[in-house]
Image (cartoon, rainbow, N blue to C red):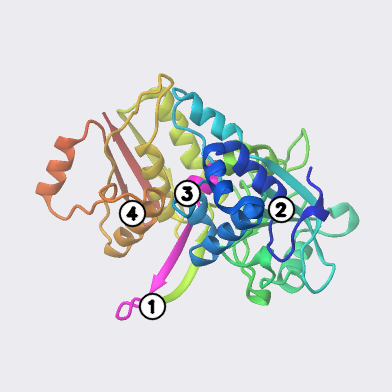
Amino acid sequence: MGDPRAFDRKLALDTTPFVQFIQESQPRQWERFRKIYGSDSEKQIVSRFCREVHQTHLLHVLRHGFTDRGIKFRAVFWKPETSLNDTTQEQYSANIFHCARQLHYSLTNENSVDIVLFLNGIPVVSMELKCQFTGQDTTNAIQQYKFTRDGKAPIFEFKRRVLIHFAVDLTNVYMTTKLEGGATYFLPFNQGSNGAGRVGGKGNPDNPDGYDTAYLWESVLCKDRLLELLQRYLHLQVERDRKTGAVKSERLIFPRYHQLDVVTKLLANVRENGPGHNYLIQHSAGSGKSNSIAWLAHRLSSLHNGQNEKIFQSVIIVTDRRVLDSQLQDTVYQFDHVEGVVQKVKKSSQLRDAINNGVGIISIFNSNTILGCVLSG
């Protein structure tokens, strides 16, 4: 549990764990940095991080790090794909997590948000918690986010600090990635009345062992899963003018629960049983098939089995819609920002070459409501 009083409202950062993470996880880089800046080093590293986030966005800095005077720093270390490298395991363990309750964040008043989760001093998740026993529910939490949580406050500035906001009560969860006053749009983050992956209605199943919404902190906002979400799921969707290339709109995409559930279950099955199996997923119209395809393809491309062996060498996404094709390329490219990792295949000869060059092939196809996967070895 962190101290809310240590939070720098103007920087929207808890600088003590941020600097501590840098010093302890990257001692060689820090020593070089300290020789340049001396007693001003801590202030300078915070300043450089903040400038880089404003020039790009927080997800970009988390995934690619930031550089000062030729010295590259990481703001987080992701969980390694295999257990073969002790150094990467130690770096992952160096991440510092804490939460703050009733965090006073505003520069103009003493408004506070119920819970904020921090990663290495960086606020990444906020939550407003309500209880039906006191006469309040998620409706009240959503109203707070819309009308008393200033989206222009540094901590809520879109794509630069907190990346996902949850409105939570004892039975339901809703989420948004951008606070826009009365126009703020929340999506449900529920399992469905009969549980994830089962046909049913809205809401969540009764939980005999606790609150119906306990899955949020038990299986979503825990350390490994939260880092996985930040590294492999969140992405910035940018719409540009076709003629000028100017940015028309931006949306930060966070998976709905059913999307996260289906990708997680498929990965677990493939990791245990290997390639050579077929899967069929029913995805209702408008429920985010395109992103589910991109997330699944990306995750499968780096999947390893229990023996630290890579399962697939190639990922092929087959689609009959040009708009979807472009969206998938942009989404996957954000995760694997390396030239040549994501390539467009237009002709049968290119597809044949890709198959001949790859040991494992993943073909993913979709219709209006069905997402199918053929995972071959």
Residue at 32% x, 49% y is 338
Foreground disc of the pair 1, 2? 2
Describe residue 3's horizontal placement relative to residue 59 as left or right.
right
Q: CA distance from mark 3 to mark 2?
A: 22 Å
> Can residue 137 be spotted in the picture?
yes
Q: Residues within 10 Å of mark 4 (few under 14, many from 20)?
A: some
**Mark 3 sits on what residue?**
71
Looking at the image, the residue that sits furthest to the left is 349
* Residue range corresponding to the magenta coloring: 228-245
Residue at 35% x, 38% y is 301
Tell me the amino acid under the disc marked 3: Ile
The secondary structure type at the circle numbered 2 is loop
Residue at 50% x, 66% y is 55
**Mark 2 sits on what residue?**
14
Q: CA distance from mark 1 to mark 2?
A: 34 Å
Q: CA distance from mark 3 to mark 1?
A: 32 Å
Sequence-earlier tag: 1 or 2 = 2
Tell me the amino acid under the disc marked 4: Ser
Sequence-earlier tag: 4 or 1 = 1
* Residue 107 image point, x, y percent: 77, 71
**Image disc number at residue 367:** 4
Residue 239 belongs to the span the image colors magenta: yes
**Mark 1 sits on what residue?**
246
The residue closer to the viewer here, 135 or 220, is 220
The secondary structure type at the circle numbered 3 is strand
Q: Are marks 4 and 1 in contact (CB under 8 Å)?
A: no
To which quarter of the image does residue 54 belong? bottom right
Compared with residue 107, is residue 287 higher up or lower down, i.e. above or below? above
| Quarter placement of the N terminus | top right
